[in-house]
Image (spheres, rainbow, N blue to C red):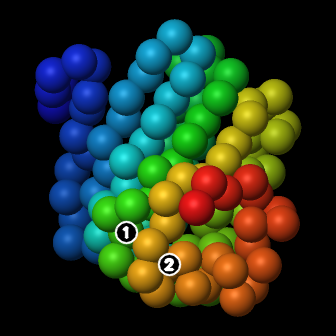
Amino acid sequence: MAGPSGWRLATWDGAMDYTVHDSGTLRELEMRGQITFEADTDFRAIIAEWEKAGIADCVLNLSAVDYMDSAGLGLLVMANNAARQAGITFRLKHPRGQVRDLIEISEFHTIIPCEF
């Protein structure tokens, strides 16, 4: 579904929701809800669109993600690996609460750049 300024809303499945905004070669995904194993299909769809969209830089805004587990971290690793193979710069931004704690405790920000 198209929204204002090029934002598109993904279908809500109860676990994770995201909005996509493209600006030139930059794609920002505003993630909401929970990033768990149930988000696997959405993450694979997100990754599949990268090459078609011709983006060079991808940012996952995690400010509205309430919860993430170790499977969610695995999905971020999968996305990071896919981005690297496609020559896309990939980073995270604004995790909060439990998500920020998980990223810091696991030192995940040493694997994927993260703007706190």
The crowding category of the residue bearing disc 2, from other C-alpha atoms within 10 Å (few below 14, some 14 to 19, many at least 20), is many
Is there any visible trace of residue 42 in the rendered image? Answer: no
Question: Which residue has dot 1 on it?
Answer: 65
In front: 11, or 20? 20
Q: Residue at x 26, y 45 (%)?
A: 10
Q: Quadrant of residue 110?
A: bottom right
Quarter of the image holding residue 5?
top left
What kind of residue is marked 2?
Val
Q: Is 74 placed above or below 4 here? A: below
Say left or right for 111 vs 76: right
Percent across and percent down for residue 47 are: 58, 42
Q: Residue at x 64, y 77 (%)?
A: 103
Secondary element type, mark 2? helix
Q: Residue at x 81, y 28 (%)?
A: 87
**Residue indicated by mark 2:** 99
Tell me the CA gap for discs 2 and 1. 7 Å
In the picture, the quarter occupied by the C terminus is bottom right
Residue 14: mark in rendering: none
Identify the residue at horizontal 21%, vertical 72% (top origin): 14
Tell me residue 31's x, y (percent): 38, 56
Helix, strand or loop status at disc 1: strand
Would you place residue 63 above or below residue 67 in this image? above
Is there any visible trace of residue 113 in the rendered image? yes
Image marks 2 and 1: residues in contact by CB distance under 8 Å: yes
Can you give x and y, in whole percent of width and height, for residue 68 in the image?
48, 80
Q: Position of residue 56 (x, y in %)?
A: 68, 22
